[in-house]
Amino acid sequence: MNAINTFLRYSRQMMVPEIGNEGQQKLIDAKVLVIGAGGLGCPVLQYLAAAGVGTIGIVDFDVIELHNLHRQILYHDKTTGQSKAIIAQKVLMELNPHATFHVFDEKLTPDNAERIISDFDIIVDGSDNFATRYLVNNTCVQLSKPLIYGSILKFEGQIAVFNHNTSKNLRDLFPEPPEPEDVPNCSLNGVIGTLPGIIGTMMAQETLKLIIGIPVLHNELLLFNTLQWSFMKLRY
């Protein structure tokens, strides 16, 4: 895409003094991996693509189910039963055909995590289970990759930026994962459809800020209660 079309497409964010031409070029040059194309991953992917992030990886082995549709807005009825990662790529290519998308239609495991993560600059974890979160965190620490973390439940969400500019990582905050039976999840406790959109957009915001070089959360866990509209920032 030539300079004129780049400006026309991204002009409204390029007018922000902290972004400008230099910041937009950083976005175009960036390579971001999004793990999970579900409730959190959908808004993250949409906003990264729309903002002009040049290379985006999508990791998800799951298929689209009917109960996903109230919150995973990349998908619709006719895509049920199909691969989330592949459908996400198709939709995002229509949103921004100038970006490059890499699809990993496979489960992230200890055997493939390093191979998949190593080619990207920034990792965004939209997974919904502690096993994957710890695997992603450990691999990012090993490879010195910054990690954008988020999680949701009912009306509440939390985000953090790990392993960036000497900041701590997930194990510094939660040394060991809880027992599976002690962890509430959306399947049993539910989630309002707009919540992952809110938290996922916040995760995308931190990702864009990190790429551009704007200060991001540092050794801070941001807790957001959308029922009471209250923020709490915990230092760790």
Image (cartoon, helix red, strand yellow):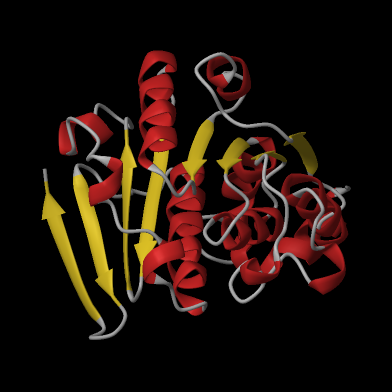
Please state the horizontal and vertical placement of residue 10, each as a whole percent of the image.
71, 62
Q: Residue at x 78, y 48 (%)?
A: 83
**Quarter residue 61 falls in:** top right
Front residue of this view, candidates 194 and 207: 194
Q: Is residue 92 left or right of residue 60?
A: right
Front residue of this view, candidates 73 and 188: 188
Please state the total of marks drawn on the protein image. Answer: 0
Whether residue 54 is visible, yes or no, is: yes
Q: Relative to residue 229, is residue 142 depicted above or below? A: above
Q: Is residue 85 left or right of residue 205?
A: right
Front residue of this view, candidates 55 and 85: 85
Q: Residue at x 39, y 34 (%)?
A: 131
Q: Relative to residue 195, is residue 42 depicted above or below? A: above
Please state the horizontal and vertical placement of residue 12, each as a whole percent of the image.
65, 70
Q: Is residue 156 left or right of residue 56?
A: left
Please state the horizontal and vertical placement of residue 158, each as a whole percent of the image.
30, 59
